[in-house]
Amino acid sequence: LVTAVAGVAAAQPASKPAPPPAATAAAAAEVKAGTGVENKESVGTASEFTVGTKVWVWSRVTGATGTTVKHVWKKDGAEIWHANLAIKSNRWTTASRRQLKAGSYAVDVVGADGTVLGSVAFTVK
């Protein structure tokens, strides 16, 4: 059965693609630096590492389902590298890693909207 409707449909404005979802105000991240990740947990957690050690930064992100966060690695306050990490559930663990030279480091977990959700600081000697 086909039904015809008389009249002309109003023109619809072109729709813009939806922006990526932003982290909610309740988004947060627990962040740790260590020597590895096992069973979705940080291992070898410390605030000081020796040169030559691969440092892993582990984060447990909550309240940011369906977004992408960044691990922003900084040495002496200047960004040296970042990793884009997809968050696929309300409580998601993820990690990034680097082998670093001596110095003072911090890694911020930054939400899709630019908000710092958590951070960790450590030294490599």
Image (cartoon, rainbow, N blue to C red):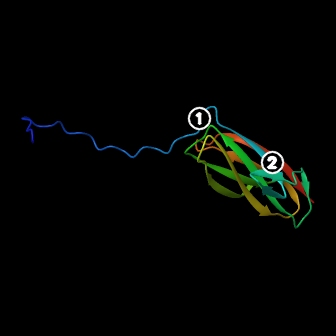
Crowd band around label 1 with a 10 angstrom C-alpha radius: few (<14), some (14–19), many (20+): some
- At 74% from the left and 54% from the top, the residue drawn is 73
**Quarter of image, res 16:** top left
Per the image, the residue denoted by label 1 is: 24
Q: Position of residue 62 (x, y in %)?
A: 66, 39
Give neighbour class at mark 2: few <14, some 14-19, many 20+ (Cα, 10 Å). many
> At which x and y percent is residue 121?
83, 48
Residue 89 in view, yes or no:
yes
Which label's residue is closer to the chain start, 2 or 1? Answer: 1
16 to 51, vertically: above or below:
above
> From what the image shows, is residue 52 above or below residue 104?
below
Q: Nearer the viewer, residue 100 or 86?
A: 86
Res. 77 in view: no
Q: Residue at x 61, y 32 (%)?
A: 25
Three-letter amino acid code of the residue under disc 1: Thr
Q: Amino acid at mark 2?
A: Lys
Image-quadrant location for residue 1: top left
Instruction: Return the residue at label 2.
Output: 32
**SS under mark 2:** strand
21 w.r.t. 54: above or below:
above
Residue placed at 17% from the left, 36% from the top? 10
Question: Left or right: 40 with respect to 115?
Answer: right
Which of the pair 95/78 is nearer the observer? Answer: 95
- Kindly report the distance in space between the C-alpha atoms of the residues bearing marks 2 and 1: 22 Å
88 left or right, relative to 10: right
Q: Residue furthest top?
A: 25
Placement of the C terminus among the 4 image quadrants = bottom right
Residue 46 percent across, percent down from the top left:
89, 51
**Residue 4 image point, x, y percent:** 8, 38
